[in-house]
Every structure is written in C-alpha cells, then in structure tokens.
C-alpha cells in the first residue's frame, strides 16, 4: 500500500507541471497551424476516405522534436520522378489542445474526433512552408508523471495532396495547392470577344459541280481521306472537296474507324461539260464512292470568309440568297477552337445564279448575353448554370480569359455560363480542355489515351468472352 502522507499526483502538482510545460512550449516552440480533416465521403465497408476537406486552421505552439532536421527517407529519385519522404515530430500541449481547439471543432459536422489530435489531420509547418499529415499520435510519453500526461507527440509525414479541398482562408496555407492536382482549363468569352463573321460568294456561269452524291459510305476510315476530282477542260477550274466521317453506325468507332457521311465542296470548279469523276484515297479506310452532278446554268463556285468573327460556341448557320429564278444554294461553316469561323463549304451549289448573291452568317449570341463580368477568386467554387457542374478555381487570367480549375464534379459544356460563388464573376464557356496542360508531370491523361487505343472498352467484354 502506498504511503498516504505523500500525495503523488496531487492536482496542484499536476497543474504546476502542466503550466511549466506550456511555458516551455511558448518559449522554445514554433507556431504551427493545426488543420482538422473533415470526412465528407467514406467507404462504408472498409472506411476508406473517398472525399475529405480542410477548411479551418488553428494556430498553436509546438516544439520541434526533430532537432537534426527532417527524418524519414528524404528525397527519392525513381522512374516516376522525384518524391519527398520527409518526416517531422512535433510536441504540443495536451491542455492547450483540449482547452483551445477541442471546443472549436467538437460540434462541427464531419469531424470524427475532437477530443485529441487524430491521424489524418494535417499540420502547416511555417519554417519549411510545408504541409505534414499526422500519421501517429503518441499520448503516453513522458509516461504518467505525477499520474498524468501533459503533451501529445505528433509523428508526421509530408502531406501528399490527392485533390482534397484545402480552403482554410489562410493564404500561406491555401497557396500550397495552387498548381498541384489535376487541372482543367476553361476558355471563357469576354465582353469584347463577340463579333459576327462575314463572307462573299463567287458564281460560275456554267459547268460547276453543284451536288455530291454518296454511293457507298465505305468502312474503317480513321481520318479524313483525300477527295479528288477529274480535271476541268482547258480554261476551266478543277473542283475540290472535303469529306466528313461519321461513327454513328454499328461497328464504327475506336480502331474500327468510321464511314464517309458527306462530301462538301471547297471549290465547285467551273467549265465542266460532263460530270467529273471523284476519287477517295487515304484515311485508312476503303470502299467509299461518290458521284457528282453539274449545272449548265449559274451556280455557286465557292464562298470566301472575309471576317471570321469571334465568340462563336458552335458553327453558325450560313444563308446564301436565292437567285431570281432557280434554286437556292446552301453551305455550312467550320469553327476554330477559339470560336472563329475558318471556312464555309458549299453543300449545294444551287441553280440559276447570274450574279454573286449575298451571304449571311448568323451572329454569335448578343454581347449582352455573353458579356463577362467580375474576376474569379482562387479556391472559390464555380457552378455551371446549365449542367450544374461545380469546381474549384486554381487560377484566373483576365487577359487571356483562361480559367484553371480542379476538383471538378461533373462535366462543363460549351456555351454555358459559369458563376463564382464568392466573387459573383460570370462568364460564358467558349471551350473546355479536360486534359491537364498545366501540371508539368501530369501524364495520366496520356497514359489513359494510349491504354484506350490498346483495349476497346466499347466492347461488352474487352478481355474475351462476351
């Protein structure tokens, strides 16, 4: 039996020792930020964390027990690149944590343990400007001096970012993930990026191709074949055309290629007295065939784009004025990735034109609809107003109207408006680049593309039996 006259573990002695510990930590420690993890989504079977979030940070003094520098394996060079394996050991006051941090987080949703530091939370270490993840919390060293413990020892490893939300409101912490993770790029339309395109038509008085008839769509075309026309008679102009490929038939797609759907006219030619022969070569396919029809009266020979305009989301409608007597010509337009009309192809040359008709290209949406306003803020949530897709802002370049985003939930579509939750910035999407072109070592898209070329996942069972 212990001697009852010696009060080993008296409350006053324990409080004195805790106060001394607290004082030493304030004198010799470093102010770090404790960042608790919120478990947004977990696997119900093995409790794997699917989605987590860090949106609060609490400064607290800590003693750096790794007095010889970072521990662990250090910097490793492997075939996958350079990887840091640094460890860090910190000591914090048990009383300070329980009196300061616990009350602030104990009633916060999705925080599973508030009474003590827990594995999976992260620490911002300002001396190295780095984030460390807590891997183990030792709470029994020193071992029950005066029948009580006074500190937590946090054994940490360098934090590996995996698209978690890090939005604490502390700039020096949040900027740690500014250019890491999978980054998509949206090109947006500004208020000065919208203008209509214009074009003019040229008429051939006689002997131009006014229609192409597909006789056989062929098979296995993986790229556009070359379209050739037999030469026009002396003094005439030889026609030229361009093919479009469709994959909308059974047996098309992937390595199987596609079929030729239409052949449109770049130049309908002029001076033909008989229908020219059409050759279709290249493109990896075979079997396609087509014939041409010509007109002996005036027909549209070609359309020239005089102003490509800007701000188009989809190819605009082309309207060619009808002749005084005969049949109206038709055409289609093509767009560049930046929303500029690059060409107008003739789909039907019409009949009876005696002079060049006017060509009208539908203007893009009105400036008032596409005008961009505001400036997006780093880490804020943006939402697509049509698709409902959400993402986090990585970087906004107001000069080029490029918006870099990550943690994308859904798929943004061209033409929809994206609005910033905090900034109120609002712009219309001109184009979407889902592949990461920002991160220097983001090869996952390339690997996936190459893998898809090897295995056709459109099959029911690409591994063997159906």
Image (cartoon, helix red, strand yellow):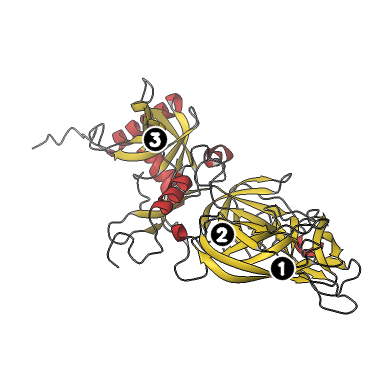
Any part of residue 401 in sight: yes
Q: Secondary structure at mark 1?
A: loop
Front-most of residues 460 and 162 = 460
Q: Residues within 10 Å of mark 1 (few under 14, many from 20)?
A: some
Q: Quadrant of the C terminus?
A: bottom left
Q: CA distance from mark 2 to mark 1?
A: 55 Å
Residue 111 in the image, given as x and y percentages of width and height: 40, 54
Q: As drawn, is 297 to the left or to the right of 49?
A: right
Q: As drawn, is 339 to the left or to the right of 251?
A: right
| Quadrant in the rendering for residue 234 | bottom right
Dots 2, 3 in contact, CB < 8 A = no
What residue sits 36% from the left and 53% below the top?
49
Residue on which disc 3 sits:
80
437 up-or-down from 311: above or below: above
Residue 7 in the image, given as x and y percentages of width and height: 21, 35
Residue 275 is labelled as 1
Residue on which disc 2 sits:
390
Q: Earlier in the sequence, mark 3 or mark 1?
A: 3
């Amino acid at each position: 039996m212990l001697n009852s006259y010696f009060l080993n573990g008296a409350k006053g002695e324990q409080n004195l020792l805790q106060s001394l510990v607290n004082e030493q930590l304030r004198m010799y420690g470093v102010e770090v930020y404790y960042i608790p993890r919120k478990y947004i989504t977990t696997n119900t079977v093995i409790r794997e964390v699917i989605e987590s979030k860090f949106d609060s940070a609490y400064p607290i003094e800590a003693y750096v027990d790794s007095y010889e520098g970072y521990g662990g394996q250090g910097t490793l060079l492997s075939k996958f690149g350079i990887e840091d394996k640094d460890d860090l050991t910190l000591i914090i006051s048990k009383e300070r944590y329980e009196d300061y941090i616990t009350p602030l987080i104990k009633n916060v949703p999705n925080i599973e343990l508030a009474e003590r530091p827990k594995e999976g939370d992260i620490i911002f270490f300002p001396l190295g400007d780095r984030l460390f993840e807590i891997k183990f919390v030792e709470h029994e060293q020193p071992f029950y001096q005066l029948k009580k413990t006074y500190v937590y020892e946090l054994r940490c490893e360098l934090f590996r970012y995996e698209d978690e939300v890090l939005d604490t409101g502390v700039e020096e912490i949040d900027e740690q993930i500014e250019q890491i993770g999978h980054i998509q790029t949206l090109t947006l339309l500004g208020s000065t990026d919208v203008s209509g395109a214009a074009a003019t038509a040229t008429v051939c008085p006689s002997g131009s191709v006014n229609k192409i008839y597909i006789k056989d769509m062929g098979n296995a075309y993986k790229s556009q074949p070359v379209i050739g026309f037999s030469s026009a008679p002396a003094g005439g102009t030889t026609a030229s055309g361009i093919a479009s490929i469709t994959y909308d038939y059974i047996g098309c797609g992937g390595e199987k290629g596609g079929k030729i759907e239409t052949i449109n006219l770049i130049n309908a030619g002029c001076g033909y007295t008989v229908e020219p022969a059409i050759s279709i070569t290249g493109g990896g396919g075979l079997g396609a065939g087509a014939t041409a029809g010509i007109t002996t009266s005036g027909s549209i020979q070609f359309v020239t784009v005089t102003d490509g305009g800007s701000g188009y989301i989809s190819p605009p409608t082309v309207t060619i004025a009808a002749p005084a007597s005969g049949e109206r010509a038709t055409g289609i337009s093509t767009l560049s990735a930046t929303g500029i009309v690059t060409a107008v192809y003739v789909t039907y040359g019409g009949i009876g034109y005696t002079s060049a008709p006017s060509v009208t290209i539908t203007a893009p949406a009105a400036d008032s609809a596409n005008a961009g306003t505001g400036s997006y803020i780093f880490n804020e949530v943006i939402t697509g107003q049509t698709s409902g897709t959400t993402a986090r802002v990585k970087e906004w370049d107001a000069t080029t109207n490029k918006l870099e985003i990550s943690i994308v939930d859904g798929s943004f579509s061209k033409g929809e408006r994206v609005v910033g939750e905090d900034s109120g910035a609002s712009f219309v999407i001109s184009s979407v680049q889902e592949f990461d072109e920002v991160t220097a070592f983001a090869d996952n898209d390339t690997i996936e593309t190459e893998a898809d070329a090897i295995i056709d996942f459109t099959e029911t069972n690409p591994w063997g039996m159906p």
